Amino acid sequence: MIAKIVKGSNFKGVVSYILDKEKDAKILVCDGLFAENKETIAGSFEAQARMNPRVTKPVGHIALAFSKEDEHRLTDCAMAGIALEYLKKMGITDTQILIVRHFDKEHPHVHIAFNRIANDGRTISDRNERIRSTRICKELTRKYGLYFADGKEQVKRHRLKEPDKTQYELYSILKSEVSRCGNWRQLMANLEKQGVEVQFKYKGCSDEVQGVVFSKNGYSFSGSKIDRRLSYSKIDAALNANRHEERQRMATNQTADHEYPMQQPPQYEPRSNDDLYSGSIGLFMPANANAQADENYFEEQLKRKNKKKKQRKIRF
C-alpha cells in the first residue's frame, strides 16, 4: 500500500478526474457533499473552502494504491475501511471527503478528494505529511497482512512517463555503479559513459560539498530525490566502504602469498634402463632376465621330451 499526495486549488478539476466514466469510477464514500452530479459535488467543496479564503490550495487529493496480489481480498467495503482509517491517522477528519475506486489499472486503487478546510473553518495541517503518510501506509499494510512490494524494482517502468521514467533509469544506473566504484572520479567517469552528468552543490561560497545532482535526458534530480540511499553523504560513505574492502582484500592476498608461497611442482629424474621393466611375459622382471628365462624354459622342455622317448623304448 502506497499513497501519493497532491494539493491544488481547483475542486472542479479533481472531481472531474476522479469521477471520469472512462476510468470506470465507483463512489465508495461521499461525506458532507451534495452528490447529485459532478457539479454539485465540486460546488459543495468550494462553498466550504470559502470559510477560510486565506488558504490558496484547499484541495486535497490522495491516491491509495495496493498490490495486485491483494486484489482478491480488497472488496469495496475493505478498501473504503482502510482509506478511512488512513485519513483518521493522518488527521484528516471532520471535513468533506469523497472516496472513489477506479478499475482502469491492473492494481487496486482508490482516489480520495478532501477539503483542507475543515467543517469548523480550521485548516487541516499538512506538516510532514509525506513522512507521516509513508509510516502510516506501512502500519496498515502490516496490520491487514497486505503484500509488501520490494520497492523500485517492482515498478513497471515501461509504463512510466517523463520525468519518472528518467528518475527510475537513474536509480538503476546509480545502484549498479556505486556498488562497483571506489571513488567519485571513477563513478563520474562510468556515469558519463551512460549519459549521466554529475554536479555538486556546495555550502555557501566554501568548498564543502552539501549535495549532488544527477542529470539525464534533460531532467535533473538530487541524489536524495532519486532514492534516500543516493544522497551525497550516503554515496560517499558507500564509495569509502568499497575502497576499504578492496584494500583489505589486497592485503589479505599479499599476506597469503607471503605465508604460503606457490609450491614448485616436484622434478622427476628419468629412470635408467636398469629400472625399466618390459613386456607382459616378463612382467616385473628386468629385461636381461627375460632372455635367461626363455633359455631355461626351452632346456627344460627338451629334457622332458628326451625322457618321454626313453620311456617309450622300455618294454616289459
Image: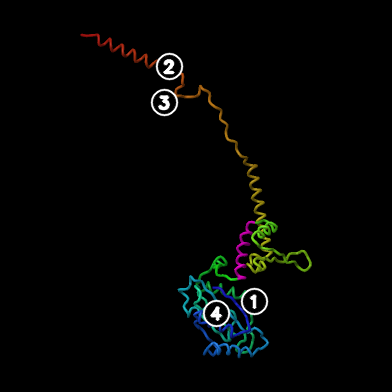
Mark number displayed over residue 111: 4
What secondary structure characterizes most of the magenta part? helix
Q: For the residues labelled 4 and 1, say whether their Cβ atoms are less than 8 Å apart.
A: no
Q: CA distance from mark 2 to mark 1?
A: 107 Å
Number of labelled discs? 4
Mark earlier in primary sequence (2, 3): 3
- Kindly state the secondary structure of the residue where label 4 is placed: strand
Q: Tell me residue 224's x, y (percent).
A: 66, 68
Q: For the residues labelled 2 and 1, say whether their Cβ atoms are less than 8 Å apart.
A: no
Q: CA distance from mark 2 to mark 4?
A: 108 Å
Q: Which residues are magenta?
A: 162-180
Closer to viewer: mark 1 or mark 3:
3
Q: Tell me residue 222's x, y (percent).
A: 67, 68
Q: Amino acid at mark 2?
A: Gln
Q: Tell me residue 151's x, y (percent).
A: 56, 67
Q: Which residue is mark 3?
A: 280
Mark earlier in primary sequence (1, 3): 1
